[in-house]
Image: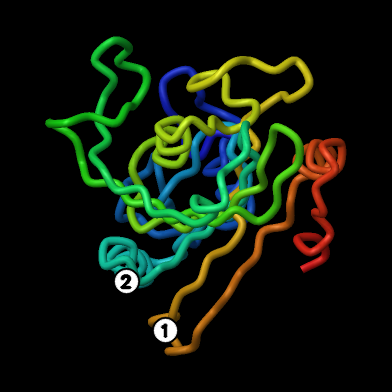
Amino acid sequence: MVVHPAYGNYSGTLVNALLYYTNNLSSINGNIRPGIIHRLDKDTSGLILVAKNNYAHAKLASMFTDKTIHKTYLCIVKGNFSEENLNGRIENLIGRDSKDRKKMAVVKENGKTAISNYKVIEQVDGYSLVEIAIETGRTHQIRVHMKSINHVILGDSTYGNEDKNVKRQMLHAYKLEFLNPLDNKEYIFKGRLFDDFIEVAKRLKFNIEKYLNK
């Protein structure tokens, strides 16, 4: 679902669902985005943090800025990696694509620094299962970074080719780790994989079991 109401999407969003559940949400981002600290791309599944009061919102927002909230994604990408490239760090500038303003791209100027660290978990013929820990949260960052190293995320019709067997990009916000400012305890949350992700992974013969039931 879309995270918050916007032009063309006024209902059926995460914010609508949250407001049905509770009125206790932070007001820092106004009436349109109560509680919302960060977002996920449309059709990206997984974890998202929501703040119930302004104190928590301000603290968590500053932790995102200071990079003390660690976000790890799981994705299926096209192609296989060479032995020397099974782990890597991608650091460059991301900005609007000069040829298509709806898309983002790696640019040489007028962009924002974007950093993604990837680790290949498993490879099958023509596809790879990859964990990606991001240090920044730029729009479409992981999707653009994977394209930049010629490993487009499976099902990503914006940055790759449409695949009739996959209905969305196989990208999942899998893990959030942070020190809670309210009780000073470390929390690790893992987001359950969606059924369509599991189905595609199993069809490709990935050993996805270790990511299930956690």
For numbered disc 1, what is the local secondary structure? loop
169, above or below 135, in the image: above
Which residue occupies 45% across, 75% down?
A: 178
At label 2, the amino acid type is Lys
Residue 60 falls in which quadrant of the image?
Answer: bottom left
Estimate how packed mark 1 is, as few (under 14), some (14 to 19) or many (20 or more) residues with alpha carbons within 10 Å: few
Residue 184 percent across, percent down from the top left: 43, 89
Which residue occupies 86% across, 36% down?
A: 203
For numbered disc 2, what is the local secondary structure? helix
Contact? badges 2 and 1 (CB < 8 Å): yes
User: In the drawing, what numbered circle is on residue 59?
Assistant: 2
At label 1, the amino acid type is Leu
What is the residue that sits farthest to the front in this orientation? 83
- Quarter of the image containing the C terminus? bottom right
Alpha carbon separation for disc pair 2 and 1: 9 Å
Between 43 and 112, the residue placed more toward the observer is 112
Residue 128 shown left or right of residue 111 in the figure: right
Residue 144 shown left or right of residue 72 in the figure: left
Residue 205 percent across, percent down from the top left: 85, 43
Which residue occupies 80% across, 47% down?
A: 206
Residue 32 percent across, percent down from the top left: 39, 39
Which residue occupies 46% across, 30% down?
A: 147
Residue 156 shown left or right of residue 147 in the figure: right
